[in-house]
Image: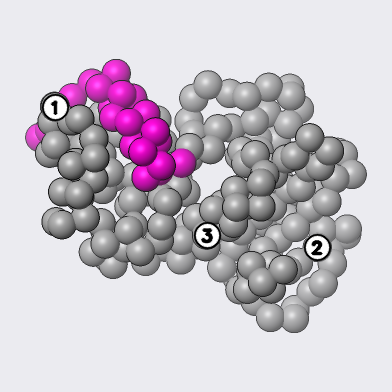
Amino acid sequence: MIFVSSIFDLLVVRDAALLESILKYIAANTGSIVSTKKISDYLTSSGRKTTSDTIDNYLKMLESAFIIYKANRYDLKGKIFLKTYEKYYMVDIGIRNRLTGLQNKDYGHVLENIVFLELLRRGYEVSIGKVGSLEVDFVATKPDEMIYYQVSATIMDEKTRERELRPLEAISDNYPKYILTMDQNIYNDYSGIKIKNIIDFLLE
């Protein structure tokens, strides 16, 4: 793959095949909570024996090259960053599609990746919010600002809508809360939680 080879040209890599496997794993699992052990176990079960430490080193290498971005989890009740189970996002959706061969069509996570990059572009620090057992997709912060975001391809289904609303409803503070979706004009506000079309959000 030409793109992967060009990455290796920029990085000093002992095991190019392993790095390619890790990058493909991240691309296929964009927006999913992962850990170095989970990646190591997956690759080992696929016949590519490795260790969590090696995975961690290669992930840091990919981060330093701005090929992937890590979003840490933040406990909104304890007000602390958690040290395990983060999410990774690709620097470009086209690169992700190239690596996955367009076989992974999880549009929800693709949209999540797009929103994550846009929040970074706007100058926010971006983390994943944890409220008890619930998860907020993004906590976007600046020194004088905090905004909560849920991202969903659609919330037309009642169960999906309830699932996306629940984490935001569990947050006790009064910072702005949004659900970003591809739906058009179904709701503007739900108990103080604003619903916004993702295209409108990106064009702001």
Q: Is residue 115 left or right of residue 76?
A: left
Report x, y in % for residue 97.
Answer: 31, 63
Answer with the quarter of the image where residue 204 lies.
bottom right
Q: Which residue is mark 1?
A: 14
In front: label 3 or label 1: 1
Compare residues 94 and 74 and report the one nearer the observer: 94
**Left or right of residue 23: residue 67:** right
Task: Choose the circle earlier in sequence order: 1 or 2.
Answer: 1
Density class for disc 1 (Cα within 10 Å; few <14, some 14-19, many ≥20) is few
Closer to the eye: label 3 or 2: 3
Residue 175 has which mark?
Answer: none
Tag 1's secondary structure? Answer: loop
Residue under label 3, please give it. Answer: 114
Residue 194's mark?
2
Quadrant in the picture for residue 198: bottom right
Q: Are marks 1 and 2 in contact (CB under 8 Å)?
A: no
The residue shown at (69%, 80%) is 184
Name the residue: 62% across, 41% down.
126
Task: For mark 2, give the secondary structure.
Answer: strand
Magenta stretch in the rendered image: 47-69
Asked if residue 39 lies left or right of residue 167, the reply is: left
Residue 161 in picture, x, y percent from top left: 68, 63
Q: CA distance from mark 3 to mark 2?
A: 19 Å
